[in-house]
Amino acid sequence: MQIPQFPFEIIAWASIAKEEHKGETGTAHWQVMNVGNIRVRKLTYSPGYKADHWCKKGHIIHCLEGDMQTELNDGRIMPLKTGETYVVGDDCEAHRTATKNGCVLFVVD
């Protein structure tokens, strides 16, 4: 990853509007900050959220609160809980996320 020239900035998440994204079940709220072609997000998944699509984009995802499960297209289920981070590259294992109890994530992609 190459971070483009960008002035020092503090992200005050409370001031960034939330975008609602419906899942197959539940809802995700995204707060998005773009730094050149890098997207920085804070995601809040409702209890019972399940993504409505398979994703092949690369991510760095850190779980701030709660827990979630990422299903890989080969059938593996990868749990992620508070304080843990996962990394996956572009065009690697397709994945989709679900959470039983809800979670808050910090995502760079």
Image: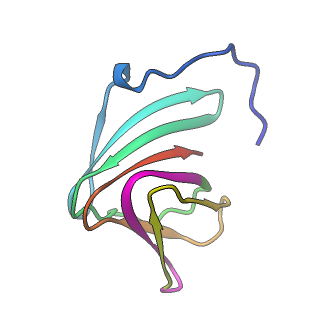
Where does the magenta region start and end? 60-75
- Residue furthest out toward the bottom: 75
Where does the image place residue 93, in percent across and percent down from the top left? 60, 72
Q: Nearer the viewer, residue 37 or 77?
A: 77
Looking at the image, residue 91 sits to the left or right of residue 72; the answer is: right
- Residue furthest out toward the front: 83
Identify the residue at horizontal 39%, vertical 44% (top origin): 43
32 up-or-down from 9: above or below: below
Identify the residue at horizontal 35%, vertical 23% (top origin): 14
Identify the residue at horizontal 47%, vertical 66% (top origin): 80
Q: Is residue 41 magenta-colored?
A: no
Total marks shown come to 0
62 up-or-down from 17: above or below: below
Q: Is residue 72 magenta-colored?
A: yes
The picture quadrant where one finds residue 90 is bottom right
43 up-or-down from 53: above or below: above
Where does the image place residue 41, in percent across and percent down from the top left? 48, 38
Identify the residue at horizontal 34%, vertical 62% (top origin): 51
Magenta residues, dominant SS class: strand
The picture quadrant where one finds residue 70 is bottom left
Q: How is the image coloured?
A: rainbow
Q: Nearer the viewer, residue 48 or 73?
A: 48
Where does the image place residue 18, in percent across and percent down from the top left? 31, 32
Where does the image place residue 12, in percent across and percent down from the top left? 44, 21
The N terminus - image quarter: top right
